[in-house]
């Protein structure tokens, strides 16, 4: 699933549904971050966990910001997350979280 497909699915949501989706994304990101646990055999566990911490910080900042502002578009937010994930080397695990959160939309 690419970013445009994610945006197509999520842009159709109203504000409350989008908030719930972002919360689901955060929950899926906690699962993806676990791939960086030392017991999981990840060679660079600390950078992996730091990357997901930074991504989640951005996610919660966006959730807080969107409560009272509408100047930070979903497109720019998601593009930024994807770029940060790629630059941090966690794009595969982040992509899984993104796809899983979108797949959950179908079960609602």
Image (cartoon, helix red, strand yellow):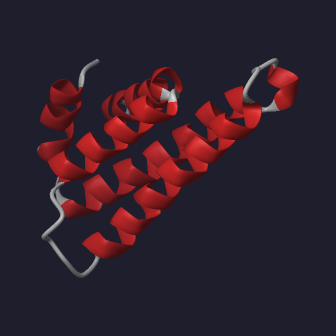
Quick one: quadrant of the N terminus?
Answer: top left
Q: Is residue 70 left or right of residue 65?
A: left
Task: State the image quarter where residue 16 is shown.
Answer: bottom left
Residue 89: x and y in percent read 51, 27
Residue 72: x and y in percent read 18, 64
Q: Is residue 6 left or right of residue 12?
A: right
* Rendered residue at 72%/27% (across/down): 44
Residue 45: x and y in percent read 75, 32
Residue 41 or 100: which is nearer the viewer? 41
Quick one: quadrant of the C terminus?
Answer: top left
* Rendered residue at 69%/26% (across/down): 35
- In the displayed structure, would residue 101 be above or below residue 54? above
Q: Is residue 70 left or right of residue 99?
A: left
Residue 103: x and y in percent read 37, 27
Residue 50 or 39: which is nearer the viewer? 50
* Rendered residue at 24%/21% (across/down): 2
Task: State the image quarter where residue 48 is shown.
Answer: top right
- In the displayed structure, would residue 101 be above or below residue 73? above
């Amino acid at each position: 699933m690419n970013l445009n497909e994610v945006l197509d699915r999520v842009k159709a949501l109203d504000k409350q549904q989008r908030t719930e989706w972002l919360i689901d994304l955060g929950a899926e990101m906690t699962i993806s971050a676990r791939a960086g646990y030392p017991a999981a055999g990840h060679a660079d566990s600390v950078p992996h966990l730091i990357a997901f911490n930074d991504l989640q910080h951005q996610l919660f900042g966006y959730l807080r910001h969107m409560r009272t502002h509408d100047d930070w578009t979903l497109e720019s937010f998601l593009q930024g997350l994807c770029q940060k994930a790629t630059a941090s080397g966690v794009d595969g695990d982040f992509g899984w979280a993104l796809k899983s959160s979108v797949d959950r939309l179908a079960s609602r």
